[in-house]
Amino acid sequence: MSPGEAPQNRVRVFRLGRDWSQAELAGRAGISRAAVSAIEGERLVPSVATALALADALDCSVDDLFRTGRSSTGDIAEHWAWPPSSAVARYWRARVLDRTLLYPVEATPLGELPHDGLGIPTHRPPTPLAERTVVLAGCDPASGLLARLYEQVTGYRMLVFCRSSRQSLDLLKQGLVHVAGVHLGAAESPNGNAAAVHLSLAQPAQLLRVTTWDDGVAVGSRTAATSVRGLLRDRLTWVGREPGSGARQCLDELLHDRPAPRRIARDHRAVAEAIRSGWADAGVCLRLVAEEAGLRFLPIRTEAYDLCFTTALAADPRVQALIRVVQSPAFRHLMIELPGYDSRRAGELQEVAH
C-alpha cells in the first residue's frame, strides 16, 4: 500500500450480496460475530489470517474485500471497468457499489455521448455525475428508448453497453454494472431467465420484466425458402452470435449437430446488416431489427427479456428509479408499436434466491 492510502472495506457489501447475517458469515469464516461487526464498522483491522478466512467464505479475493480505494484526503481511487483499447482513452465515469469505475467510450444505442474525461485512472474527489449514473449491459436494440425516457423522467444518466446475456451477467457478478439484460428463456417458461441467473450469480437477485419479443431467422432476398424447415434444406451461409447470447442459443437449437457459423456478429443489428449487405444468407435476430433492415423474418419463438440486478443493489436510488420507469405507462406507450415486442407485463418483479 502506498503512503496516504487506506484499505476500502467491502465485507458488508459482499455479505449482504449473499443475503447472510453477520452470524452466518462469522460461522463460515470461523470467527466471532462481534469480530465481523467490528470489521464491517471499521473498528477492527483484521489480521492476515482473518482476512483470508473472510475472503474464502465469501468466495472472493482479499483485495476484493479490502481494496485500496481512498486516500487520506478523501479522494477516491478510480479503476477501469475493463481495459481501454488505447493508453489514453476517453471514458465515462460511474459509481457501482463502493467503487468509482471508468468505462472506455464505445458506440451506444443513444449514439455519441459526451465523455467525462480523457486519460488514465487517478485519485480524485467523488463526482456528482458518477453518483447519478446507472450502468446497464444488455443486447436489447430498443434500449436507447429506455435510456432516453429514464434520463428525462429521473434526471439520472444511463450508460448502455451492448453485451450478450452471459457477458452481461458476468459483468454484474463482478460488480462492474448495476443491471444486466437477460433473454435466455422462452416466454412460456416463467423460470427460464431465473434459472440462468441462479447458475450465473453467487448471490440473491431480482428480475424486472421489460418485454417479450419475437426471435427468429432473418433472410436475404437471395434466399427463396419460405419456412424455417426450408432454410435447413438449403445450403446457406449463416451468420451467428457469440456463445452465451440468447440468439446463439436459439441458433444452436435450430441447427442441432451442424457446425456453428464461422461468421460472428456483435449484436442483433449486426446480424441483420450482414444479411442485408450480402455477407450472409440468414441469421437469428429479433423481428424488430429484421424489419428495420427490410429483411424477411421467419419466427421461431417468443422470448422473455428481463433486467437483472443483485439484492445488494436493489435499494440503490438509481435502480429504484429504473424500476419505476419500466413500470410506468409512459414506458409501455413507447414499446407498444415496436414490431415483435409485447410489454404488457413490463415492470413485474421476480426474486431469484441463492
Image (cartoon, grey):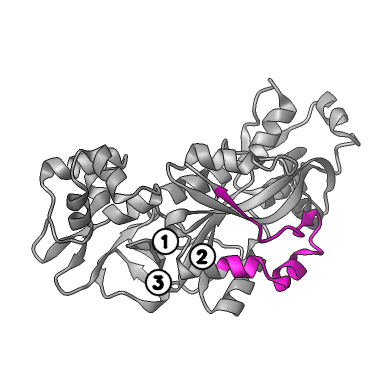
Whether residues under marks 3 and 1 lie with C-beta atoms below 8 angstroms apart, the answer is no
The span picked out in magenta is: 322-351
Q: Does the segment drawn in magenta span residue 337?
A: yes
How far apart, in angstroms, are the residues tagged by discs 3 and 1?
11 Å
Query: Residue under circle 1?
Result: 103
Considering the image in quadrants, where does the N terminus appear? bottom left
Residue 73 point in image, percent of width and height? 16, 74
Whether residue 55 is visible to the viewer of this picture, yes or no, is yes
Residue 208 point in image, percent of width and height? 61, 56
Query: Residue under circle 3?
Result: 130
| Depth order, front residue of 316/124 | 316
In the picture, residue 55 is in which quadrant?
Answer: top left
Of marks 2 and 3, the one in the foreground: 2
| Image vertical order of residue 72 relative to residue 178, above or below | below
Q: Residues within 10 Å of mark 2 (few under 14, many from 20)?
A: some
Q: Secondary structure at mark 2?
A: helix
Of marks 3 and 1, the one in the foreground: 3
| Image vertical order of residue 234 relative to residue 320, above or below | above
Residue furthest to the left: 3
**What residue type is disc 3 on?**
Ala
Residue furthest to the top: 257
Query: Residue under circle 2?
Result: 319
